[in-house]
Image: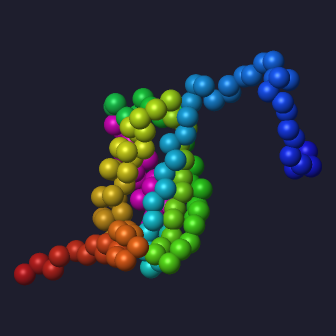
Amino acid sequence: ATGELQTIPFSEVNHVINHSRDYGLANIQFAVGYQADLKEVDEALKATYEQLMHHKELARYVKGELKPLGVSRLDEWGVTIHASIRIIPDPYNFLTSEFYRLLIPELQKRQIPMVLSPTASIHTTTPVQP
């Protein structure tokens, strides 16, 4: 494998095997502020995955472990984190949506700043008790 582009005319393709028909990938991508502790972000991801696995209905979608893929992008607003989970086919991205729903409180609990928009970010703090 030299990395060269190989072009195969459609007329030459006689047989195709879909090796991924039994599973898909839930691609998890979200941005945090530059001041975020990436070890805490990783812990939030793991805690969210554990919640998912303990949820009777959601756990049945999962076919593999959480795979943290690290930082996928840096831009002027923050750091984009990427992870994936092997799941059963999910054409409506139900599991990914539920993962995000569970992830937000985990990030807030750890006071991890989430990028809200190109001009603002969320900073969570513990309220001061009187």
Tell me what residue is drawn at x 59 percent, y 62 percent: 72
In front of the other: 35 or 11 = 11
Image: 87 above or below 1: above
Image coordinates for residue 54, horizontal then vertical, percent:
36, 38
- Magenta includes 45? yes
Image coordinates for residue 69, horizontal then vertical, percent:
60, 56
In front of the other: 46 or 89 = 89
Q: Which quarter of the rendering shows the N terminus?
A: top right
Image coordinates for residue 6, horizontal then vertical, percent:
87, 41
- Looking at the rendered structure, the number of numbered marks drawn on it comes to 0
- The boundaries of the magenta stretch are 39-55
Image: 52 above or below 114: above
Tell me what residue is drawn at x 54 percent, y 57 percent: 82
Q: Residue furthest left?
A: 130
Residue 40 is left or right of residue 116, and the answer is right
Tell me what residue is drawn at x 68 percent, y 27 percent: 19
Magenta residues, dominant SS class? helix
Image coordinates for residue 117, horizontal then vertical, percent:
37, 70
Q: Residue furthest top?
A: 14
- Magenta includes 29? no
Image: 14 above or below 9: above
Q: Is residue 53 visible?
A: no
Q: Which quarter of the rendering shows the C terminus?
A: bottom left
Q: Is residue 31 visible?
A: yes
Quadrant of the rendered image containing residue 14:
top right
Residue 50 is left or right of residue 14, and the answer is left
In front of the other: 121 or 86 = 121
Tell me what residue is drawn at x 50 percent, y 78 percent: 76
